Image (spheres, coloured by chain):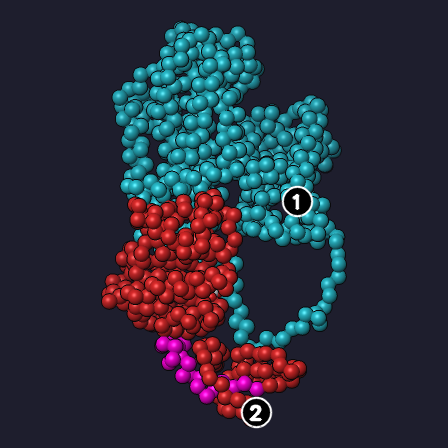
Chain colours: A red, B cyan
Amino acid sequence: MIHLEIQNVSKRYARNKYGIKDFTMQIEKGILGLLGPNGAGKSTLLKMIATVHKPSSGIISLNKNNIVQDPNYMRKQLGFLPQDFGVYPNLNAFEFLRYMGAMKGVGGPPLHERINQLLEGLNLMEAAKKPIGSYSGGMKQRVGIAQALLNNPKIIIFDEPTVGLDPEERVRFRNLISDLANDCIVILSSHIVSDIDTIADKVAIMKNGSLISYGNQDQMVQNVTNRVFETSIEKEHLSSFKFQHTVVSTMRKDGKLLVRFIADQPMENAINQKPNLEDAYLYLTKKK
Amino acid sequence: MKPFLTIIKSDYLQRTRSYSFLITLCASLAIAYTFVPEPNASYSTIRIADHVGYYNSAWFGYVTAIMTSIFLSLIGFYLVNSGIKKDIETKVGQIVAATPISNFKYLCAKVLSNFLVLLSIVLIVFVMSLVLFMLYNDGYPLELVQFIKPYTFITLPAMFFIAVIAVVFEVFLGKFSILQNIGFFFLYTTLMVSTPSNESYFSLDVFGSKIVMHQLEGQVRVLTKKDKSTDLSIGYVIGNTNDTKRFLFKGMDFPRSFIMSRFLLFAIGIGFITLISPFFHRFNVKERNAKKKLTPSIQTQLITPEIRLTKLPIPQINYSVWPIFKTEFKLLVRKGKRWVWFFNLIGMLLLALLPLKIAHQMVLPILWFLQVGRLSDLTTKEAANRVHYFVFSSYKPLSRLFVSKVFAAIMLMICLALPLIIRQGLLANVCAIITILLGSIFIVVFAVFLGMVSKGKKLFEVLFFMITYANMNSIPFADYFGGLEHQTSYFTGLLILVMVLGGLSVFLRTYELKK
Ligand SMILES: Nc1ncnc2c1ncn2[C@@H]1O[C@H](COP(=O)(O)OP(=O)(O)O)[C@@H](O)[C@H]1O
Ligand SMILES: [Mg+2]
């Protein structure tokens, strides 16, 4: 049974400047959605799990093997899509993937076949013979995704994978991922709830370098039961309204604004709403 | 084994499939063409006192092999010493770092792809040497062995050595490319100058050229029955081709110890990589580099006041070039590591204090050469930083941005030379001042032109380096800033060259914009 353990991990970038601080978390098989606003420390955490960076202190272990000391144990079963990655612009997708395959230590005809199918599945087949330098952002992102899946990884880390993908590609990506989760760990990070709410088995919310909530989606949503309301207000009042409540969304209706918001106390004229993950996320991250 | 080859192959393809590599190959072809002078040419490359060999296979093979070994070692280092840096820049490194590939394998792959890149150039030169033989030979038959042997035992091991050194330098001095360049320059000079006195030390000569030179000198010494003045001169010497005497060079038998040493060079290189691989940063470098750029995102979670686009202040329109020029100048000054300015200041101080002749002839070109990094990507940096779309879509990019960029660079060069200009001014040396100004314009326009033609910065860097090297040796032809005595026609020529290059650059940029 695959098991990833993060114990008291800190990453210090400068004096008094921590990417994450004293972070502890246990991850089992399944899809984990890692949510948090920009700068929360998601990338910092993921890079350390991926053994690209070393923690300043603390232990990360995979199946009881300390991967800080033995990074290759992790690397052999890892697929990693960094948030801000690059490609060799002069190689085409085929060549680049074969190159990455070689780096990961896989090869042979099966790799060939796997690359073909990944390119097919990610809708890159047509462009596969053109240099990656000529790709659009979304295409490049998909090459990155393919790269992460080359070696049949058991632990897969995607840092903001849906950046640059259009809605259709996002759906495609989700379908691809949901297939994976049977016996491996998949970690998806995002700052957009809708990217992960349909596929994540568990959700972790980070803020300022710490874990502020971790559980399955139902548990998350319970945080905001009876706290989500809807009311309509004048446009001019929005600013002051935002000052008092956490606004989830606004919608124009009949010259007024329909506001969905979170409040600890019920309010007159406000209608109680069925909470969802987005509400919970906002509630937890905005809470002081 | 197969995956390892894939890595090398891809790396090699990535590096060679570029326009600038094509240019490099063309340049190599052109340079190789000069390695053995045409029979009536007025310059010589390798010459022992007043002797050169009959134009037979051995002469062509050995001369071009030695020339390649010596020159390509110098230039080649600068061509291949950014293999790892590229992986950092392209951010492929992050992905590589997360794969199980060992440091040793990764570095070896870099060494071998460096080696392959150099070999591609060697191959071009080799073909050229055969072509030259066909063109000029004195009726001797073609003996392929006389070509293959020197290239195998002299050039190839030297190239491998360079490939290894480039990686070693990158591992230890990855962040300081200036130190890499200077360090290699010293290493190269030391290795070149340290002449093995004893024959058994020829094995220690990594460039492998000394042993051949020794043999050539010996042969001529026997012919002339003199001990002295049979020194072999190597490099481009103009106008010493009167009453050349010929002798027959039939190639040589390398002693077994020498051949063994060439194989050992490969083994030692790999051993070296084994030793240094634990020190490789494995792309755990971004942290410190990124720190400066990544000012911690101010956590704007409190109430951000809503903004209304219609209520925003409307900026004034100002098409003046002056603000752009100022920004470009600031960018140029701030570019690169700050401690380079320490050297710049020392250079300016020396310009003010040293005897006028030395200041002008030696200090000025070195001081200007220190700016190579600022000049080399003057026109290519937009594309490299992926901002060229903004630039090219800005208002009148050609006349405003391009011009202010060029002027900012010229201004920088002039500022650096200011102490010297003032001194010359005090002596009323108007000519000297004009030539310095002309020189600053020339070098900037040269950088701009080469940057646009080669779409990269290497070509200019390498040529600037060679020019400066020539300046150090007081070669009149390379004197673009009036350090030596010339006739006026020389500067008229330079002026015309500047205008042609400038005109072509403007033309090229206009063309780029129209695309
Ligand atoms: N290389 C770095 N040097 C200094 N600070 C960094 C570096 N990388 C990230 N940080 C800081 O660490 C914090 C977490 O960043 P990051 O992990 O990238 O967040 P996220 O991925 O959640 O947006 C941020 O405040 C960021 O400014
Ligand atoms: Mg991030």
| Residue B333, position as x, y percentages in the image | 61, 49
Q: Residue at x 52, y 29 (%)?
A: B26
| Residue B88, position as x, y percentages in the image | 44, 50
Residue B197 covered by magenta stretch: no
**Which secondary structure lies at badge 1?**
helix
| Residue B169, position as x, y percentages in the image | 40, 42
Q: Which residues are magenta?
A: A208-231
Amino acid at dot 1 = Leu
Identify the residue under disc 1: B513
* Residue in the foreground of this view, choosing between B117 and A158: A158
Residue with the most extreme bottom position: A268
Amino acid at dot 2 = Asn
Q: Residue at x 45, y 60 (%)?
A: A83
* Residue in the foreground of this view, choosing between B3 and B376: B3
Q: Residue at x 54, y 17 (%)?
A: B43
**Mark 2 nearby-residue class (10 Å; few <14, some 14–19, many ≥20):** few
* Residue in the foreground of this view, choosing between B166 and B415: B166
The image shows residue B487, relative to residue A20, as above or below, that is: above
| Chain for numbered disc 2 | A
| Chain for numbered disc 1 | B
Q: Which mark is residue B131?
A: none
Give the quarter of the image for residue B457. top right
Q: Which mark is residue A269?
A: 2
Give the quarter of the image for residue A235. bottom right
Horizontally, residue B258 falls left or right of residue B151, namely: left
Q: Quadrant of the N terminus of chain A?
A: bottom left
